[in-house]
Structures are given as C-alpha cells and as structure tokens.
Amino acid sequence: MCNTVFCVVVNNYTSVSAVTRKDGKILSNAGEMNFLQVFALFLGAIVVFRVFFAMISICKFKFLYNHVMRYSLYKFDLYEEAKRLRSEAEDWNESVLETDMALLENNNE
C-alpha cells in the first residue's frame, strides 16, 4: 500500500513542481528538502522500524526457546516409542486411546 501511495505522490508531485528553472537550466534536485524527499525518508524509516523490531522479536524467541523450558519442545524417538508400544500391546483390537494416554503420561514425567 505504501508503494502505491508513493507512486501516486511522485507522479502528482513531479508533474506539478519537481523541476525548477534556474538560468534556463532544468534542475531536478536543487539541493533542498522538499515534500517528496521527506515522504521517501518517512517510508524508509517505516521499513527500518519494522526490520529492527522483527529482528528483536526473532532474537527474543530464539533466546526463550533455548533457555526457558516452557518454550522448548519435547524430543523423543518415535521409532523407539513405536517398538515399545508394539511390544507392550497384547491385544491389537483394544483401544488406541489407552496407549496414547500412556505416551502422554511418560512424556510429562
């Protein structure tokens, strides 16, 4: 959306008063700050702001993931867990819910 607004403003501003005449020469940049340059700096500041705080957010999450147990994921070997469940199952027709509950209880310990 900001790019569209910038294009509209650039189109309107350049067609009205972006070029100045001095001694018969057309100057596109007279060395002074005008509305278009301030608007471009504003949009650049928005981009820098978003990138900066996105990097801070990513670093914060990485820190919490590595150092706080509440944010870390449980790791276990599914292949070994499947072998264990197969060896423990006496009747393959029983409900799977009991084995799922046992898996969750073992994971919380």
Image (spheres, rainbow, N blue to C red):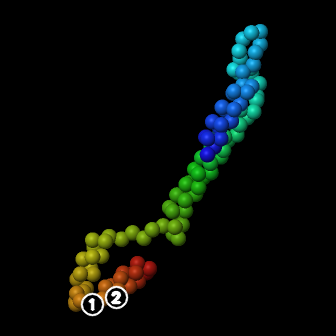
Q: Quadrant of the C terminus?
A: bottom left
Element marked by disc 2: helix
Amino acid at circle 1: Glu
Q: Please tell me in which quadrant of the rendered image residue 79 appears.
A: bottom left
Q: Is residue 5 visible?
A: yes
Report, in whole angstroms, how far the alpha carbon at label 2 lies from the one at label 1: 8 Å
Q: Is residue 40 visible?
A: no
Which residue is at 50% across, 61% downward? Answer: 66
Which residue is at 77% across, 9% downward? Answer: 23
Residue bearing the label numbered 2? 98
Q: Position of residue 59 (x, y in %)?
A: 56, 54
**How many neighbours does mark 2 have within 10 angstroms: few (below 14), some (14-19), or many (20 or more)?**
few
Q: Position of residue 97 (x, y in %)?
A: 35, 86
Q: Position of residue 78 (x, y in %)?
A: 31, 71
Q: Which mark is residue 35?
A: none
Q: Position of residue 99 (x, y in %)?
A: 33, 85
Is mark 2 in CB contact (under 8 Å) with mark 1?
yes
Q: Please tell me in which quadrant of the rendered image residue 44 appears.
A: top right
Amino acid at circle 2: Glu
Left or right placement of residue 17 versus residue 48 in this view: right
Element marked by disc 1: loop
Which residue is at 61% across, 46% downward? Answer: 1
Work out whether residue 69 or residue 85 is closer to the camera in this orientation and state it: 85
Q: Is residue 34 above or below residue 64?
A: above
Which residue is at 66% across, 31% downward? Answer: 11
Residue bearing the label numbered 1? 94
